[in-house]
Each structure stands twice: as structure tokens, then as C-alpha cells.
Image (cartoon, rainbow, N blue to C red):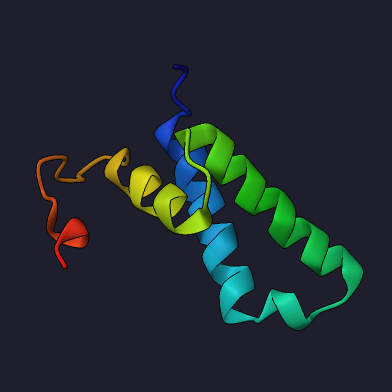
Amino acid sequence: MLMAHPAVLQNLIEQYDTLRILRAEDGDADVQQRMDDITYTLCVATGTRDIDAALVAARHQLPGARPLDDSVLAT
């Protein structure tokens, strides 16, 4: 599987977080489409099927991530 460059992942995460904070899902069609595009791209780049898993996977691929830390998986 190809892996996205960490800088690309960081940029996508930042864009996603910004749009989520600004409540893009309540915005106009262009803003909603941008949110959908970023969500899709994150899922493809991380080999996942939903945004929550994509965000976890992307963050684990960033420099400084602790790949052996599975605390996000604890229930």
C-alpha cells in the first residue's frame, strides 16, 4: 500500500479539523463538498473506510507519533 507523505496528512487533518470546528456540515454546498473531499482523501490515504479511523491512522503516521501506543483503542 502506498503511504501519503506526513506533510500531506498533516495538512488534511488541519483542514478537516478547521472545517469541523466551523461546522462545515451546516455550510453551503461548496463547503460541504470540500468537507466530503477531505474526508474521502483521508480515508483513501490511510486505507480506512470512515473518518474516525482515518484520523487515528493519519495521526499515527505523523512524525513523533507513538506507533505502539494503543490507548485510543482502549474501551
- What residue lies at 57% left-to-right and 61% top-to-bottom? 16
Q: Quadrant of residue 42?
A: top right
- What residue lies at 59% left-to-right and 74% top-to-bottom? 20
Q: Quadrant of residue 31?
A: bottom right
26 relative to 2, above or below: below
28 relative to 11, above or below: below
Quadrant holding the C terminus? bottom left
Name, please, the residue furthest toward the right: 29
Name, please, the residue furthest toward the left: 68
- What residue lies at 52% left-to-right and 52% top-to-bottom? 50
Label total for image = 0
Q: Nearer the viewer, residue 50 or 37?
A: 50
Quadrant holding the N terminus? top left
Name, please, the residue furthest toward the front: 75
- What residue lies at 48% left-to-right and 33% top-to-bottom? 47
1 relative to 57, above or below: above
Residue 58, horizontal then vertical, whole percent: 39, 44
Residue 37, horizontal then vertical, whole percent: 72, 50
Image position of 64 (left or right of 40): left
Image position of 10 (left or right of 15): left
Image position of 58 (left or right of 26): left
Residue 59, horizontal then vertical, whole percent: 34, 49
Image position of 32 (left or right of 18): right
